[in-house]
Amino acid sequence: MKQSRFTLSEFLALVVPSVLGLAGAAHAADAGDSGEIVVTSMRTPIEIEKVASSVTVLDAPAIEAAQPVAVSDILLRTPGITLARNGGYGEATSLRIRGADTGQTVVVVDGMRMADATSTTGGFDFSQLFTDDISHIEILRGPQSILWGSRAIGGIVNVTTLAPTRPLEGSVSVEAGSHQSVNAHAGLGGSSSIIDWRISGSAFTTQGIPTLEGGTTSNGYQRQAASGTVTVHISHDVSLDLRGYWTGGRNSYSDNYNVPGTIYGGDYGLSKQWSLYAGLNVSAFDGLWKSRLAIMENHTDNESVEPMAVPSLTYVGHGRIRRYEYQGDLAISRVLDLVVGAEREEERMAAGSPYDTVPFAMVEHTNAINSLYATARVMPVRGLTISGGVRYDHNDLFGGNTVFSAGGAYTPDGGTTVLRATYDQGFKAPSLYQMFSDYGVSGLRPEKAKGWEVGASRSLFHKAITLGAAWYERNSTNLITFAYCPYSGTQPAICYVPGTTSTRFGYYANVGAARTRGLELTGALRTGALFADGNYSIVMTEDRTEGASTYGQQLPRVPRHMANMTVGIDMPFGLTPSVAVRWAGASLDSTYSGTVLPGYVLADLRMEYRAPRGLVIFGRVENVADRHYQTALGYNSLGRTAWLGLRGHF
């Protein structure tokens, strides 16, 4: 593959001195940064220096300082993460952790696993997740199926919304930017000895940009969202959690070429997602045994509309995922903690179009997984944490699957120095679409992964500087890929739509294997008014499918080299200017096209002014140089954009 014009050596000459000498946002922390940081993506709170896997924690100040609109905007600035988006906001968005496909990442919002049962891979649609009322984001890298089950091959994105701390408090923000974009959010909540509550709502609208390269008509996008949480303290040892999340969007997706003699069709898609959670928490034996019993449900509804077609409604999809969970946390002694759990996940999909044999027949397909898991943390000596676990899942369609994990973290000096090593396994069950769509094969086996990593972090000068490094490897087998049928001649039986005499041009099959190796370097600085952070990642993801013409080739849309850097200063009169730079090397667009997407460098300017009465005026110019780049062949990306906003907490 060709490298970008801005070479790796040139970029390293610019960035590495800043990363290693200045490097970290004042509020962002990687593993080992501070013993005060508590990680919840392990399904029970644990200090970050006791976690064996690499994890990045972003708190509310770090999120606000980065000024992202979508969560993916800030995730791609953390180590090992790449993003491909087919146009502007609202268009198809794929996020990969250490090269793993977007369907191999688990997304959790306030303890609710978010997924779309109707999507191709059964994963989460990152195009719909905005920062809204978010206060905390954790990115846990590497296979994590012990605790999170199917799809946790690449890692976990764990999102937590704001929790009230005062009897009555609120927040509001509004910003406007290029392409007639407006983003607004408001939240209100309160805390007492009996009940804690918070509700929030947000709205976003943009005229957008032409999705396809060469297009002349912008594709707009509108989104609304709402969330609510209630915790009722029934007694000192018993509480009830109720949570809800809803989002709805409308995005245009016409080709937008405006060919002479034709009329712009105005095609658009509608999407809705809502999730509900109810959980009962019980503590016993002076907090030594904590239990949680929960039920949650996640619904997705998608429609495609082509006003010039007859009929205009061209697709309808309904998905539902219902989960039942029990988890018990047992602190046996000061040196031994156990976590045990049982889960059941029920998945349902129904989809239809006017082109079905029976138009909009909406045939329903279901699947269920029953799971048991157990993990243990042992702290035999001061500073050393050894962890391990096992999980068994039984899928109604393909049977049983067992995964293991083991790891350790050691800090000899209370978190100033942390050494880590871990071995983890992961799996991903075939999606309902991969099994039952017109291209599905019901006998697919689960994708599997085995991975390990070693890492170290070190704080210097009373934690004014932190440095970190991690080396990892992951081997994946049984990967589900799309196989094409012969263009001519007699078609094999698998090239017929199941249950019909109609041929199809391809089908899903377990034919893939991949190996991913990589290095992640992180650094952070906070000294006086100056702050900076940086990271550099090498992601070597190779196709290891025996006999394939693509054997040894880097997997699509995963640059081998990536880096990020932010530098800013807190001025004494409340003004904080900063500069953020992101670099991505060249990548392959698809497995078979051979087309290389050139690398690119983007620079953003940010400003934040803390006015009296708790108000903050903020603004930014993204892609200052107005660089043209693509993360997916043929699809535009946002050029230079400017935003100005106001936010406040009361």
Image (cartoon, rainbow, N blue to C red):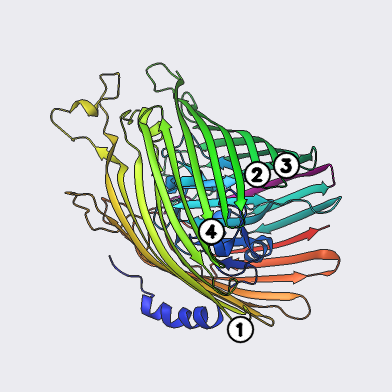
Q: Position of residue 406 (x, y in %)?
A: 43, 54
Circle 2 sits on which residue? Answer: 289
- Circle nearer the viewer, 2 or 3: 2
Cα gap from disc 1 to disc 4, whole angstroms: 28 Å
Give the main secondary structure, helix, strand or loop, of the magenta stretch: strand
Relative to 237, does residue 368 appear above or below in the rendering?
A: above
- The mark nearer the N terminus, 2 or 4, is 4
Q: Amino acid at mark 1?
A: Phe
Cα gap from disc 1 to disc 3, whole angstroms: 41 Å
Q: Amino acid at mark 3?
A: Thr
Marks 2 and 3: CB-CB under 8 Å? no
Q: Position of residue 334 (x, y in %)?
A: 62, 57
Cα gap from disc 2 to disc 3, whole angstroms: 25 Å
| Classed neighbour count for the residue bearing mark 3: other residues with Cα under 10 Å, few (<14), some (14–19), many (≥20) | many
- The mark nearer the N terminus, 3 or 4, is 4
- The residue furthest left is 489
Circle 3 sits on which residue? Answer: 229
Q: Which residues, given as a range, are shown in magenta?
A: 192-213
Q: Tell me the quarter of the image containing the C terminus.
A: bottom right
Cα gap from disc 2 to disc 4, whole angstroms: 35 Å
- Occupied quadrant, residue 551: bottom left
Question: Is residue 637 rendered to the left or right of residue 648?
Answer: left
- The mark nearer the N terminus, 2 or 3, is 3
